[in-house]
Structures are given as structure tokens and as C-alpha cells.
Amino acid sequence: MDYDNTQLKHKFVITEKGSLGLLAMGDIGLREWRKVKKAKKKEILNKEGNNNE
């Protein structure tokens, strides 16, 4: 089955908490959510490290 790629192009805002929509996207949504969650955690750790200096 051929898919028109223009139908698949959507912009999503992924938050640290995630959403049911990401779960519905399957492993792609889960992987992207994990990236955002990891980046947010790293950002928090960096801020904590800067506060201790």
C-alpha cells in the first residue's frame, strides 16, 4: 500500500509528561518522548550543578 507522505507530516509538541497520543503512535512516539524526557532530566541536573558553584 502506498502512502502519500504529505499526510504523515504533522508537528507535535512533546512534553516531559507525554500523552496518550504519543502512545498511540507506537514505538516512534515512545522513542521521541524518551528523548525529550532525557533532555529535560539533563537540563535539570545542569541547573542544579550550576547552583552549587
Image: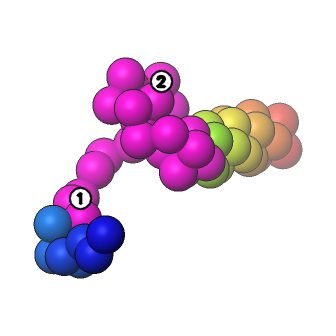
Q: Nearer the viewer, residue 9 or 18?
A: 9
Instruction: Give the alpha-carbon distance from disc 2 to disc 1, as whole Å.
Output: 17 Å
Residue at disc 2, secondary structure: loop
| Residue positioned 19% across, 76% down in the render | 4
Q: Nearer the viewer, residue 16 or 23?
A: 23
Residue 6 in percent (x, y) is at: 16, 75
Q: Would residue 33 be seen by someone viewing this image from the given angle?
A: no
Task: Report whether 50 appears left or right of 3.
Answer: right
| Residue positioned 27% across, 75% down in the render | 2
Q: Amino acid at mark 1?
A: Lys
Q: Nearer the viewer, residue 6 or 49?
A: 6
Q: Amino acid at mark 2?
A: Lys
Dividing the picture into quadrants, the one containing residue 27 is top right
Magenta part of the chain = 8-33
| Residue positioned 81% across, 42% down in the render | 49
Residue that carries the numbered disc 2 in the rendered image: 17
Q: Residues within 10 Å of mark 1 (few under 14, many from 20)?
A: few
Instruction: Identify the image quadrant of the C terminus.
Output: top right
Residue 30 disc label: none
Dividing the picture into quadrants, the one containing residue 47 is top right
Task: Report whether 30 appears left or right of 22.
Answer: right
Task: Report whether 16 appears left or right of 9.
Answer: right
Between disc 2 and disc 1, the foreground one is 1
Asked if the stretch drawn in magenta spans residue 3, the answer is no
Task: Report whether 6 appears left or right of 22.
Answer: left
Q: Residues within 10 Å of mark 2 (few under 14, many from 20)?
A: few
| Above-or-below relation of 48 to 38 | above
| Residue positioned 41% across, 41% down in the render | 25
Residue 11 disc label: 1
Residue 28 in percent (x, y) is at: 53, 51
Give whichever of discs 2 and 1 has the lower sequence position.
Answer: 1
Residue 44 in percent (x, y) is at: 66, 37
